Image (cartoon, rainbow, N blue to C red):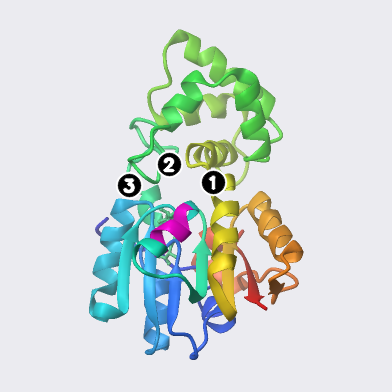
Amino acid sequence: MIGVTHIPVLCEEVIENLVSAEYSLFVDATVGGGGHAHHILERYKGIRLIGLDADEEALHIAQEVLRGYGERVQLVRGNFKDLKEILNGIGISSFDGILFDLGLSTYQLTGERGFSFNDEVFPDMRMDDRAELTAYDVVNTYRYDVLKKIIGEYGEEEKAHRIAKAIVEERKKRPIATSKELAGIILKVKKRRGKIHPATKTFQAIRMEVNREPENLRTGVLDAIDMLNRRGRIGVISFHSLEDRTIKGIFKTSAVVNAVTKKPIRPERDEIRKNPSSRSAKLRVAEKI
Ligand SMILES: C[S@@+](CC[C@H](N)C(=O)[O-])C[C@H]1O[C@@H](n2cnc3c(N)ncnc32)[C@H](O)[C@@H]1O
């Protein structure tokens, strides 16, 4: 996407807490626009990096951004839920460090793929366009009680009941055909207060359902821990308390990693000022025993 840049969040903190000059192979499980990857490769000249992303467009951008690093970089399209299979497929059975930077990149939000409230396009929201389920299917076919549960649990939206009801009522007239229409339905139930759009939590919930984010995260992180070398580190940047709780729980109960961060690392005020989308980011890091 020309003219749009994704600013990597907690970049210095990732370099400082997750990467070491002793590493030889690092996996960026969500390479996106290549922001973190670029900084890691620049700082540690001895590191080779595998960059994974489910989104083809993201990989094109990463390819451009990381072109200068030549054979030190290998980009692969795939879902991190299949991490083991994907890496085994290119002859890799272990690595020294891995980063998961969850959520969306700026390119996806501005790419007219239905992720944004103002998108007058088909409500798609798939990160991987080979997947079958779209946001259109979720809002137009899911039963009221399932919609309410998703919006309540994944969105942590206190008005989940009213929003789910409004969606079901509205689609009786005609299918909800664009993301802007969906945002409009939510706006009728939840009035605008402050800077955050009232549809934010519902959009997040639907996106998480479409991309099976909670299940994929658990599978990907458990496989990553399994494949980490001794003294290697895993880092996860999450933007949602459900994700943060999942990571905290895995790091706490795993017998093979120790949490390096007892409390998650949060962006400094200055970073939030420069990049407001970093405001809810939390980085947790653990080390393989
Ligand atoms: C926040 S962006 C990453 C930005 C990147 N760290 C940077 O600095 O440019 C998250 C990326 O993860 C990708 N992604 C999300 N879930 C994924 C999954 N289960 N498997 C692979 N990629 C995923 C998205 O497509 C998106 O490009």
Numbered range of the magenta stretch: 82-87
The amino acid at mark 2 is Phe
Spatial separation of the CA atoms under disc 2 and disc 3: 8 Å
Residue occupying the point 26% across, 66% down: 63
* Relative to 285, residue 148 above or below: above
Local packing at callout 2 (Cα closer than 10 Å; few below 14, some 14-19, many 20+) is many
Quarter of the picture holding the N terminus: bottom left
Locate residue 179 relative to residue 206 in the image: left or right: left
Secondary structure state at the residue bearing disc 2:
loop
Q: Mark 1 or mark 3: which comes first in sequence?
A: 3
Q: How far is the residue under mark 2 from the one under mark 1?
A: 15 Å
Mark 2 or mark 1: name the one nearer the start of the chain. Answer: 2
Residue 230 on image: x %, y %: 60, 80
Give x and y (percent) for residue 219: 57, 53
Which residue is rendered at x = 48% and y = 15% of the image?
171
Is 82 or 58 nearer to us in this picture?
A: 82
Question: Is 142 in front, or is 85?
Answer: 85
Q: Where on the image, by quarter, is ligand 1?
A: bottom left
Q: Tell whether label 3 touches label 2 (CB within 8 Å).
A: yes
Write down the residue under mark 3. 111
Q: Give x and y (percent) for residue 227.
A: 53, 69
Q: Which residue is mark 2?
A: 115
Residue appearing at x 67%, y 38% in the figure: 153
Mark 1 vs ligand 1: CB below 8 Å: yes
In the figure, residue 144 lies in which quadrant?
A: top right
- Amino acid under label 3? Gly
Q: On the image, numbered disc 1 is attached to which residue? A: 213
Image quarter (top left, top right, bottom left or bottom right) of the C terminus: bottom right
Q: Amino acid at mark 1?
A: Glu
Q: Main secondary structure of the magenta part?
A: helix
